[in-house]
Image: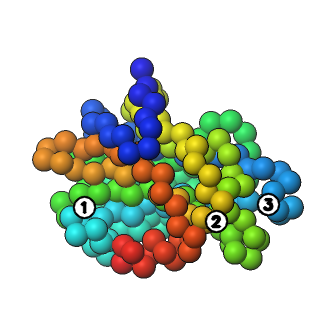
Amino acid sequence: MAINLQKGQRETLNAQKFTIGLGWDTNASASGGDFDLDASVFMLTEAGKIPADEFFIFYNNATSPDGAVSHSGDNRTGDGDGDDEQIVVDLSKIDSRVTQICVIVTIHDAEDRRQNFGQVRNSFIRICDASGAEMVKYELDEDFSIETAVEFGRIYKRGAEWKFEAVGVGMKGGLTDYLNRYN
């Protein structure tokens, strides 16, 4: 049975291989234009930096150099039920320098389209084991009225265990803010 987390809650992950599913809907009348939300992953060292550019995973760099993280591709509409984008993780392959995996969702061309996460609803991150059973889920219910990027969750290593933290923190500078932070 899945555990529904609140912002800031943490839960131990009891699987080496799992899928991170991200989902969202947009308010149709919010800006008059289409929304394109993009999931990205920053694989970070203990110092909170990516060891090399290849450890920034997104639709144009779909697989990490160690083969531990793989992005399913870009869903440009968010239409339909269930996961809009997925990221497959195999912790048994992860580079020894990596101790954190940050999952970020950004709005593509948000400034030009005058869009923000306040116009997005039903946002969630969930982690499913290899059989597809949901282990944890976090539904964002905050009002991100100026933010164009949100860190949905973070997977981090403590001792020999990997844990998931429901983060739910936004930035208004989009993906550039996160690239500057983690590079």
Point out the residue furthest to the top here: 1
How far across and down, in percent of the image, does residue 42 sit? 39, 64
Q: Quadrant of the C terminus?
A: bottom left
Residue at x 62%, y 36% (from the top left corner): 82
Is label 2 or label 1 in front?
Answer: 2
Q: Secondary structure at mark 1?
A: loop
Inspect the image, locate mark 1, and give the three-letter code of the amino acid beneath it.
Val
Asked if the residue under mark 3 is in contact with the one under mark 1, i.e. CB atoms within 8 Å, the reply is no
Residue picked out by circle 1: 98
For marks 2 and 1, the one nearer the N-term is: 1
Q: Quadrant of residue 53?
A: bottom left
| Residue 95 visible | no
How far across and down, in percent of the image, does residue 79 sit? 74, 45
Q: Depth check: 40 or 181 in front? A: 181
Q: Secondary structure at mark 3?
A: loop
Inspect the image, locate mark 3, and give the three-letter code of the amino acid beneath it.
Asp
Q: Depth check: 112 or 88 in front? A: 112
Instruction: Check the image and report above or below for 179 versus 147.
Output: below
How far across and down, in percent of the image, does residue 43 sit? 34, 62
Q: Quadrant of residue 70?
A: bottom left
How far across and down, in percent of the image, does residue 138 sit? 48, 39
Instruction: Check the image and report above or below for 180 versus 164.
Output: below
Q: Secondary structure at mark 2?
A: loop
Residue picked out by circle 2: 146
Residue at x 39%, y 75% (from the top left corner): 181
- Residue 34 is marked as 3
The residues bearing labels 2 and 3 have C-alpha atoms spaced at a distance of 18 Å
Q: Residues within 10 Å of mark 1 (few under 14, many from 20)?
A: many
The residues bearing labels 1 and 3 have C-alpha atoms spaced at a distance of 35 Å
